[in-house]
Image (cartoon, helix red, strand yellow):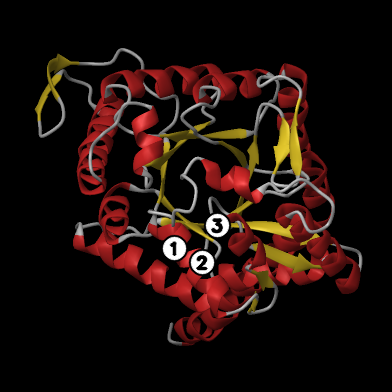
Amino acid sequence: MPVEFIGMIGTRSASEIHAPEGPVVDPAYTRRFAQAHEDAGFDRVLIGYGSGWPEGTQVAAYAAAHTERLGLLIAHRPGFVAPTLAARTFATLDQFSGGRVAVHTITGGHDLEQRRDGDYLTKDDRYARTDEYLGILRQAWTNDQPFDHEGQFYRFADYQAEVKPLTPIRLYFGGSSAAAYRVGGRHADTFALWGEPLAETAEQIASVRAAAAAAGRTDLPGISVSFRPILGPTEDLAWERAHRILDTITGTGGGANRASTRRAWRGPGTEPQNTGSQRLLAAAAKGELHDRALWTAPAAATGAAGNSTALVGTPETVAQALLDYVDIGVTTLLIRGYDPLDDAIDYGRYLLPLVRAEVARREQAATTERAQAQLPVIAGARAAR
């Protein structure tokens, strides 16, 4: 099966090593950023969610209007709009974009961030709400007849949407807690994880699959893993660049200290509440370098307030590191850089083609092997005639 590549776009130039430039919504930059991902060969781009950020479906609509085939993965927190309205919103955009919409469900792992949008539920209740919410979304997108619903969080009668998605909308789901496995295992088409070492990632994949089986599913959710690749023409140059990035994040290299900015929305001096960040920090505590090229120092420097582990090396090294994850069951690779626009272009030139070529080679080899295995069977059947 071909591997899926997802990038990430924003509405202005900014990252952990670059102070924000320009207006909060910069249409020219947003257009250029989306088009760069399409030109680079990405399958989709993630549009993130923050309590003060530009609204994601409108960003996605603008990106769709200025691209031709690029898929749009819209981060969405259940609970701030009714699921019936959300179903129509995503279905309408899917129609206008020609079937390019997918939804990335984020239940929310930080109480302070949730309260900024008026959500005071506990984490357990948030996951219970997400479970109910996603079931309603699926029904709204697929039901041909009006239906009623009376649940713990939502109640409505005689609902029927006139607008349906042009194609089935894929649900991506992020989280690393037992509750996330349970809810995402039931609903997700693709379950999204942050970039941990291979052994820990394999453990999470097993947990997701077990939750899917417990929910009665016979299909397996796809698995997405996120990284921050740092490329260089040689190993030494890649690591020199990696350490310059880290020095800028920590403020030891003359750059602005972005780490405090990344932590600010959690509150000063606080540890992360979400399990995903806790797991990244635990991996960083075990060591900076894991497996072939996984570097955890940026996660430690930023408090793991997002997908923050890097893969460092030449394009060949990083491609092989990504393929190591494919080998354990990963189907989607979400990658974004510290120089967001330039890195997206470089990934398209140097990284994506290597991974895709090797995946295609493996698929062809497997097809040939299967065909050769059938030759004795065919020959025996002919001889028996």
Instruction: For residue 364, say whether it is visible.
Output: no
Q: Position of residue 239 (x, y in %)?
A: 83, 69
For label 2, the SS is: helix
Q: Quick one: which residue is furthest to the front in this view?
A: 269
What's the mark number on residue 281?
A: 2
Question: Which one is earlier in the sequence, the residue at label 3 or at label 1?
Answer: 1
Residue 111 lies, with reference to residue 334, above or below; the image says above
For label 1, the SS is: helix
For label 3, the SS is: loop
Gap in angstroms between the C-alphas marked 2 and 1 = 5 Å
Query: Tag 2: residue type?
Result: Leu
Would residue 236 be found to the left or right of residue 176 on screen? right
Verify CB contact (< 8 Å) between mark 2 and mark 1.
yes
Binning the other alpha carbons within 10 Å of mark 1 as few (below 14), some (14 to 19) or many (20 upward) gives some
Query: Tag 1: residue type?
Result: Gln
Q: Position of residue 163 (x, y in %)?
A: 36, 15
Binning the other alpha carbons within 10 Å of mark 3 as few (below 14), some (14 to 19) or many (20 upward) gives many
Residue 84 lies, with reference to residue 289, above or below; the image says above
Q: Which residue is mark 3?
A: 303
What's the mark number on residue 278?
A: 1
Question: Which one is earlier in the sequence, the residue at label 2 or at label 3?
Answer: 2
